[in-house]
Image (cartoon, grey):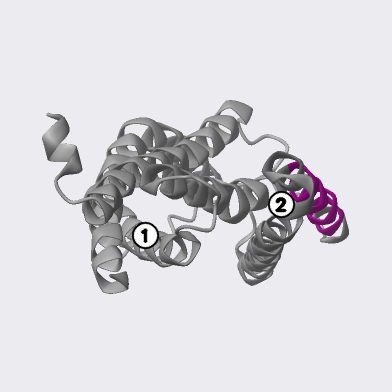
Amino acid sequence: MVRTLLVRGMLAGLVAGLLAFVFAWLVGEPALNGGIAYEDALAAAAADSGGEPLVSRGVQSSIGLAVGYLIYGVAVGGLLALVYAAAQGRLGTLGARGTAAVVALLGFGSAVLVPFLKYPANPPASSLDDTIGQRTGLFVIMVAVSVGLAVAATALAGRLAPTLGWWNAVLAAAGGYVVVVALVGVLLPPIAETPADFPATVLYDFRLASLGGHVVLWTSLALVFGVLAERLVRPGTVGARG
């Protein structure tokens, strides 16, 4: 059962990754090109071309982008399937699709949205190369803390549900999560390296496109995996409805 769910989760992730790639290629690439244009302008002003890139921009924006999103989608789909298998039957009366939707929503919120609010994605030339390690480390810490707190909040809601009811239990656990994760966000150091003359529209569009790509991926993943999981739980049900 778990192995089958894992395969279906990875398949759903493959579809979701493809859809996210299409979105990123159509929406995200113009903003990314704006950051590259700013970087090229700085290099030209400094009379330093920086040499030819190892991989051409055309390959990066097509094959490279597609491969990246497909790998990410398959990995996230596999993780979603494993969490779904553990949560199945433990979220009240939710069915297969409802459970998949809740798990995906919790995963997106804790692993993507909350860390993004603290450390949003930046286009090229908007950050210092020397701080890549620091920025990556802080971002990973924020993701780990947020996901860990989300798991703890989910467990807390399950423990409180028999006493408070599911609605009040979820509200109490969610409130505790928001308070603690906000405190962690305040304690972690901010990163403000964007040059004053960096185009604000490029920065805004890039961050919006980056978050939008995640929204497309997680939403499509929840929808596709929900259908596949329901077919596994109740074989023939979906086909019979047609």
Q: Name the residue carrying label 1.
A: 72
Amino acid bearing label 1: Tyr
Q: Secondary structure at mark 1?
A: helix
Image location (x, y in percent) of residue 176 = 82, 52
Q: Is residue 85 visible?
A: yes
Determine whether 204 is above or below 180 in the image. Answer: above
Determine whether 182 is above or below 9 in the image. Answer: above
- Judged by depth in the image, the label closer to the viewer, 1 or 2, is 2
Amino acid bearing label 2: Ala
Sequence-first disc among 1 and 2: 1
Please name the residue shown 42% across and 59% down the image.
80
User: Tag 2: Cα neighbours inside 10 Å, few (<14), some, or many (≥20)?
Assistant: some
Residue closest to the eye, 138 or 90: 90
Q: Quadrant of the N terminus?
A: bottom left
Residue 176 magenta-highlighted: yes
Q: Secondary structure at mark 2?
A: helix
Q: Main secondary structure of the magenta part?
A: helix
Please name the residue shown 49% across and 61% down the image.
87
Q: Is residue 57 visible?
A: no
Segment colored magenta: 171-184
Q: Name the residue carrying label 2.
A: 161
